[in-house]
Image: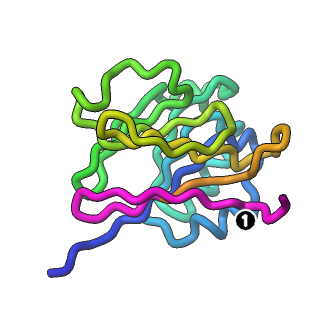
Amino acid sequence: MPDRETIVGVISDTHGLLRPEAIAALRDVDRILHAGDVGNPEILDRLHELAPVTAVRGNIDRGTWAEALPENEFIEAEGVSIYMLHNVAHLDLKPEAAGVRVVIFGHSHQPKMEEKNGALYFNPGSAGPRRFQLPVTLGRLMINTGNVEAHLVRLDMQP
């Protein structure tokens, strides 16, 4: 039996705006992780129409719907342990000691992929309203037999 690749869509900082380009970029994923600052529960409902969604609460997420979202979450995908939180400054564990392969976070609106001590730190950037001159992006994780390949997807083609 061939190995199965799992595609995980990673989105953050939608701030109440789910762009058609984001929906198109997530249409073929197996699951979606939202790293906070969702903005309103309709965003999660729309994402759930595409794939199962796991989300954490960001600093702008308020109200009863947001209180149901955890501040952090462990996710397992194809043998890869993922830890998700909104603000990496609040990371409360050592990924290498906890067996975490990927740390997903948002908050800064700046896309980032960095390997540190055997863990991939991955910020998909902001898929919501443009901030400053930062690109509008989301991410994809290709996971196969314990291996992870991360990609950033630019949602706007403007310079």
Q: Residue at x 49, y 54 (%)?
A: 32
Residue 122 lies, in percent from the top left, at 49, 43
The residue drawn where x is 55% and y is 42% is: 123
User: What main secondary structure does the magenta stretch of the protein show?
Assistant: strand
As drawn, is 1 to the left or to the right of 5? Answer: left
Q: Quadrant of the C terminus?
A: bottom right
The boundaries of the magenta stretch are 141-159
Label count reads 1
- Image quarter of residue 27: bottom right
For image coordinates 66% across by 70% down, the residue present is: 24
Give the image's coloring scheme. rainbow
The amino acid marked with disc number 1 is Glu
Quadrant including the N terminus: bottom left
Q: Which residue is mark 1?
A: 21
Across and down, in percent, residue 69 comes to 51, 31
The residue furthest left is: 1
Query: Residue visible at 45% across and 39% down?
Result: 121
Q: Position of residue 14 (x, y in %)?
A: 70, 44
The stretch drawn in magenta includes residue 67: no
Nearer to the camera, 110 or 14: 110
Of helix, strand and loop, which one carries label 1?
helix
Q: Is residue 67 above or below residue 143?
A: above
Q: Residues within 10 Å of mark 1 (few under 14, many from 20)?
A: some
Quadrant hosting residue 61: top right
Percent position (x, y) of residue 91? Answer: 43, 22
| Rendered position, 151 above or below 131 | below
